[in-house]
Amino acid sequence: MDAQPSEQVEREELSPYQIFSKAEWAKLRAGTPLTLDETELSELRGMNERVSLQEVEEIYLPLSRLINLYVAATQDLFKVTQQFLGSREHQVPYIIGMAGSVAVGKSTTARILQRLLSRWKDHPKVDLVPTDGFLLPNAVLESEGIMNRKGFPESYDLPAVLRFLSDIKAGRSNVEAPVYSHLHYDVMAGETICIDRPDILIVEGLNVLQTGKPPRDGKAIPYVSDFFDFSIYIDADEDILRFWYVERFLQLRETAFANPLSYFHRYASLGDDEARETANSIWDNINLANLRENVLPTRRRAQLILRKGDNHQIGSVALRKL
């Protein structure tokens, strides 16, 4: 099945997006040099991801060029504003939000984009923070009876996310973010990563584009996306996402789950049929429910939508019109 623009992105003449086929988007590379080789790309690919150097050239290089132009324009606007205000404040990081379903390939996309953007001379320091680290610890989720809602908006420490992004946007140095372990399926107590005034920060997670209902009294409520300068949503059909999730579960059963320290070690001994049944049950009850309730509704808030087909490749790009 070839990737097609999402049904939710209407016909181009009615849509807030300009829609590009892969071939049309690839032309916008405009001579941007390829700065990745196959060895590096193999280190950046996630499990089951099949990103090729050709796709990097056709999709990711034009995207890195676009973001580079946006960053330059924002830097110029910052300088003009500082001149107007007579201020000499430090330039603040350009923040990119990246959202999408479980198993859609957010982490791989974020890592590739991080590497490409860091090789533009005007912004060599590009950091990446997954929002998994801001999940509430398992002990808290269990005490509140929402362990089966892990990944849903209520399972995150939202005030901590907002404090982190506020400090980043304020230009503060050495801002710490918590660390999540996929092996232990939990936040690692006392472990942090330090973000020290990057030129660009990529924030990747399921619900980073979500908002809530505005209050009736008109008081301002900050959302995570309020801190983003640019946002990306990675999209694919539900049946494709299910297939990728089950495929990944079966591979993890023989790799990460086989580690006795793994939270999911109990799944390592499952046979093929039982493993597929278990993976489909987890998908239906948790990941699909979260996708439909919380993740998918944020797609239209993104400035750019990357649409994937069942071959894992991006077949179209939708860019919001200015």
Image: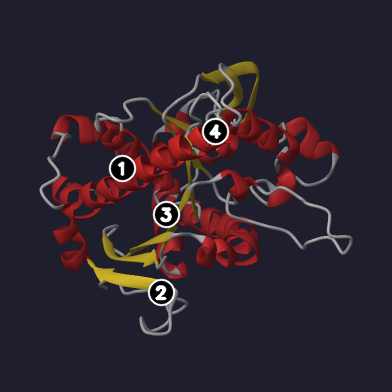
- Dot 2 or dot 3: first in sequence order is 2
For label 3, the residue is: 104
Determine the CA span between mark 3 and mark 4: 24 Å
Image quarter of the C terminus:
bottom left
For label 1, the residue is: 68
For label 4, the residue is: 265
Is 45 on the left or on the right of 258, as rendered?
left
Instruction: State which quadrant residue 245 falls in.
Output: bottom left
- Dot 2 or dot 1: first in sequence order is 2
Determine the CA span between mark 2 and mark 3: 15 Å
For label 2, the residue is: 6
Q: Label 1: how many residues lie within 10 Å, few (<14), some (14-19) or many (20+)?
A: some
In front: mark 1 or mark 4? 1
Of 159 and 109, which appears nearest the observer? 159
2 and 1 marks in contact (CB < 8 Å): no
Tell me the number on the disc at residue 237.
Answer: none
Q: Element at badge 1?
A: helix
- Type of amino acid at the residue the image marks with label 3: Val
In front: mark 4 or mark 2? 2
What residue is drawn where x is 41% and y is 29%?
Answer: 199
What residue is drawn where x is 67% and y is 51%?
Answer: 152
Q: Position of residue 206 (x, y in %)?
A: 56, 50
